[in-house]
Image (cartoon, rainbow, N blue to C red):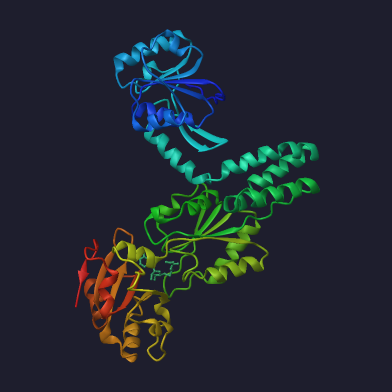
Amino acid sequence: MKTFPMFLTMTGRRVVIVGGGEQAAQKCRLMLKTEAQIDVLADQLNDELHSLARTGRINWRRGRIGPTAFVDAALVFVATGCPGLNACLHMLAKDAGAIVNVVDQPDLCDAITPSIIDRDPVVVAIGTEGTAPVLARQIKTRLEEMLEPRLGDLAALAGRLRGLAARRLGPRQRRDLWSWVFDGPMRTQHAKQGDAPVATAIKTVIASGRIPEKGPAPVALVGAGPGSSDLITLRGVQRLQEADIIFYDRLVDPGILELARRDAERVYVGKAPGCHSWPQDRINSLTVSAALRGQRVVRLKCGDPGVFARGAEEAEALVEAGLSYEIVPGVTAASGAAAAIGGFLTERGETDTLVLTTGRKAQAKERPDWVRHLSARSNVAVYMGMQTAPQIVDVLGHAGLLNEVRVTVVSNAQRADQRVLECAATELVGQITAHGLVSPAILFLRRTDVAQATVAQNAPALHAVAG
Ligand code: SAH
């Protein structure tokens, strides 16, 4: 190690920043996270620094900079933007005994500022000694995803309760207490609800002297989104990073599994349509037994786990086994498909009813519920409607609506192979075949008089418009 990481106490210490432009402002932003006293030396300040000076957050000093400028400074940042001037100022600051950082001149730096993840008081600093700033940013992004925004508050709360715990509990109990807090249900609860309920729970446990068994963690039913891996939520990524084992579906994008820990077990439990190689109760018993073994389980489903995903059945199996579950929502395919074609699922004054339904229920003799909702102001999104497209057309025919409906098919929405087709319902089956559209796809059904409203004029991804 050429540099050694250390956390400097900054409370009440003096930091000098020389320069009044963007580089100086960047250092200033960093130092403002601390309790240091900040002196900025410059003849002119940019707007940001100016307003900080006006509100008293920094002290602004103008005029000649002599050797006394750096006396008592714990840290000096030199950021004038002029390499020659920076070098002179560096000498002056060194003579005053300060630790000096000269922006963009590593050979003149005693200390370099790391990439920081700030969950104050929990702070992570990442440094690569200047070798690989891009790698540092990648690591930072990963850690930002892993550490929930409220983690610092939880650490601060624990800090406030340490004295109480030390008075009431022995060392072993204290270890169990904090492990229960940081690696158990309290952490999840705090991420959702904040300090108050968690503080009460911890105080109750300290008072009773009985630390609860951690028990199995809730099984997370996580929505992976419709396609590309950047459409999963940050909470979903957090659960993936915590997971020991991940059971995933057929339509889950492989890029999403990359977001999990490298050593997490990945188990494919996908069902090809019409093929029952993975019966539901087998999936249920696998997730249940993994959770009972003490593994942290993620059940990863495409789209949203609450939309045509048999989430309720899996949750019921967990509860029956005495386990708990958590639902992490995802972008459902209808949202993904509408967004992909520049359209909107609802529109004020145009579409006030949105129906999410499944083509599996389309039987020509029956009249599925969605037909009732197919009005001038509704948008009916049909999931799993490709194989049953002929039955959907039959249903529309029986309802006397065949000539009034237009269909937008979005196949493989939000994926590289996305295809879009818009046509009259009468031509649906022929057009799907003619354009070679495949599952998975969402079919948006609209009455003719409002059919154009879902798709913006300049929809970027319209590959085929027929009829
Ligand atoms: N839980 C999922 C739905 C699973 S059912 C969700 O909320 O989206 C499977 C159906 O979802 C597919 O038959 C198809 O209709 C739809 N689907 C899933 N991914 C899709 C995608 N990328 N593009 C279009 N439709 C998709």
Q: Quadrant of residue 65?
A: top left
In the figure, 210 relative to 80: above or below? below
Give the vertical position of 262 relative to 399 (above or below).
above
- With 405 as the anchor, is 215 left or right in this view? right
Number of numbered discs on residues: 0
**Residue under the point 51% across and 37% down:** 118
Looking at the picture, how far across and down is residue 365, in whole percent? 39, 91
Which residue is located at x 45 percent, y 49 percent?
259
Residue 380 or residue 292, whichever sits in front: 380
Check the image and report above or below for 393 versus 196. below
Rendered location of residue 24, percent (x, y): 38, 26
* Residue 174 in which image quadrant: top right
Q: Position of residue 66 (x, y in %)?
A: 40, 9
Residue 464, image x, y percentages: 21, 69
Locate the C terminus by quadrant.
Answer: bottom left
Q: Quadrant of residue 320?
A: bottom right
In the rendered structure, the answer to whether residue 223 lies left or right of residue 207 reads: left
Q: Is residue 307 visible?
A: yes
Is any atom of residue 131 visible in this view?
Answer: no
Q: Is residue 149 above or below residue 292?
A: above
Q: Quadrant of ligand 1?
A: bottom left
For the point 41% across and 37% down, which residue is it?
A: 137
